[in-house]
Image (spheres, grey):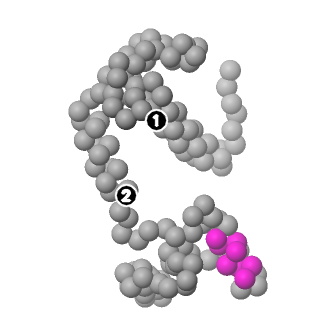
Amino acid sequence: RSFHIDESRQKYCIQLAGKRLRGFRSFLCNKFLKDEEGKFVEGEWPMKYAEIISADEWDNFVAKRRNEKFHEVSDINRKRASKPAYPYKKGRTGYARLQQRILTEEKSDATSLPEHVLWKAARVGKDGAVVEAVQNVYDECETLSQ
């Protein structure tokens, strides 16, 4: 069995599959390898997923999740992601819908916005205030784009 995907959509499909795989791995770890407090326990091979996860694959997965190096990298990434320098302020809107909304509000016939304009718009709060650091980066991008 196989999927035949148009070449123009292959990259997107692979990226989406990677996201889903990471999510599934997190689910498996949280459901079968951790208790309510988030501490590791001796998890059993989930029989519900026996069709897609062999016993050897499960053992490798458990060993990787218990590896100290894995936890170090995970902690570093968790800390890095928790305090972004320029936080995204538009919730679940996403860049595509934000761009569409801006173009509609401006009644523009353009099909897209410059990336730095969209980046700045995504970091403006509900009150319309722009953080100084964001404004500095935007101004620098504006200078470089010209």
Residue 31 visible in this rendered orientation of the protein:
yes
Look at 50% across and 85% down and name the residue there: 129
Look at 63% across and 64% down and name the residue there: 93
Residue 43 lies, with reference to residue 17, above or below; the image says: above
Q: Quadrant for residue 92, please give it.
A: bottom right
Image spot of residue 125 (x, y percent): 52, 78
Q: Amino acid at mark 2?
A: Ser
What's drawn in magenta, residue-wise?
98-105
Q: Which residue is mark 2?
A: 82
Residue 145 lies, with reference to residue 81, above or below; the image says: below
Q: Amino acid at mark 1?
A: Ser
Image spot of residue 79 (x, y percent): 31, 54
Q: Which residue is mark 1?
A: 26
In-front residue for pair 115/126: 126
Query: Badge 2: few (under 14), some or many (20 or more) residues near its Cα, within 10 Å?
Result: few
Residue 135 left/right relative to 125? left
Residue 108 visible in this rendered orientation of the protein:
no
In-front residue for pair 12/44: 44
